[in-house]
Image: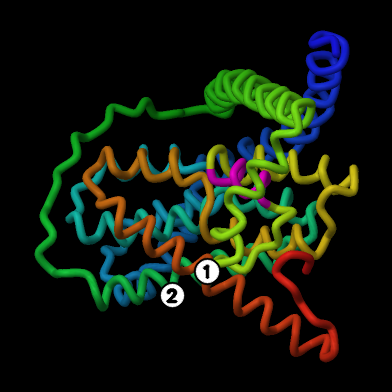
Amino acid sequence: MQFYKDIFLPAFRKSGYTTWWLLKIILPVSLIVRLLDYWGILAFMAGLLDPVFAYLGLPGSTAIVFITSIFLPLYAPLAIITSMSITLRELTILALMCQISHNLPVESAIQARTGTPFWTVTALRISMSIVMGLILNLILPQDMGNPTFVQTDLAEIFSLGGLLLVWLKSALQVTLLIAVIVFSLNLLYKLLDAYSLISKLSKGIEPLLRFFGLPASTGFLWLIGYIVGLTYGGALMMDQMKEGKVNRTDANLLNYHLAMSHSILEDNILFIALGVSVWWVLGVRLTLAWIVVWVRRIILKLRFGSLKLRITDS
């Protein structure tokens, strides 16, 4: 086996196609969101959510954080959070809501390509984030602390030209990041596949997959989704579906799980740095992922009657 010919080149070619497909979704969405913010539309939408946020134990001003998280990756709402003065209790509730519902236009589009309708997964994530916010507001202690974040010095954008320049700089950074991550993932997959390690990894986490109600065939993709998230993991899932290694039903169940809990390393580190307890956000997300998948399996079993759903081959 030749590394360059059999592993490096195939991974490089596949990464090029995958990166281009991801950028066609991510870059237009990021530009649209910047325009909506520039024209004040995001702020208007946040104002409509003020009455709802009172039931979540959050000040109305944090609605803009949640709205931003729906459209963009977590770095955007984090930038807003650090310019606010909110209690640790409020931050914990907001952190969980943003972790469940973030970057939906991109991630839901990717999940739609892997077996779960766009509006189904979008509605699921938004509704579950609000439900969990309500629940946390009921169970969290009232005296969790009051961290104060330093006001960030964000440069204002006064013209469309300035906005486009900022977007272009961000787009170039995102393009480079995506290209590196996608290539690294494909190279990793090719190496693991070449040395027959994928089946061994999947076998090792089968008890955990059974607990979460997931098929054994999704083991490797589950690991990728937890390490790097839905955007890059979804791209790899599409490749495996095309190759017949994961069927549509299995991918659909995994999508429901990852919609509630994914990228647990990066997502949690970002909020831990602000003082949030990892056990609150991680524990709630894992519990929610477990509930959602098993409810989904029950619905499928009732819908198809005699169809016997097995964890090993749904």
Which of the two discs, 2 and 1, sits closer to the camera?
1
Please give the residue where the numbered disc 2 appears in the rendered image.
131
Residue 154: quadrant of the picture: top left
| Residue 189 badge | none
Asked which secondary structure carries label 1, the reply is: helix
Residues in magenta, as a range: 219-226
Expressed as whole percent of the image width and height from the top left, the position of residue 124 reads 60, 69
Identified by mark 1, the residue type is: Trp
Identified by mark 2, the residue type is: Val
Expressed as whole percent of the image width and height from the top left, the position of residue 22 reads 73, 35
* Rendered view: 261 above or below 202: below
Expressed as whole percent of the image width and height from the top left, the position of residue 17 reads 84, 28
* Rendered view: 67 above or below 124: above
Q: Residues within 10 Å of mark 1 (few under 14, many from 20)?
A: some
Residue 30 in sight from this viewpoint = yes
Front one among 204 and 140: 204
* Rendered view: 235 above or below 155: below
C-alpha distance separating marks 2 and 1: 16 Å
Give the residue drawn at x 46%, y 66%.
Answer: 129
Expressed as whole percent of the image width and height from the top left, the position of residue 193 reads 77, 31
Front one among 163 and 206: 206
Residue 258: quadrant of the picture: bottom right
Q: Is residue 52 left or right of residue 313?
A: left
Quadrant position of the C terminus in the picture? bottom right
Q: Is residue 89 left or right of residue 302?
A: left
Please give the residue where the numbered disc 1 appears in the rendered image.
290
* Rendered view: 278 above or below 29: below
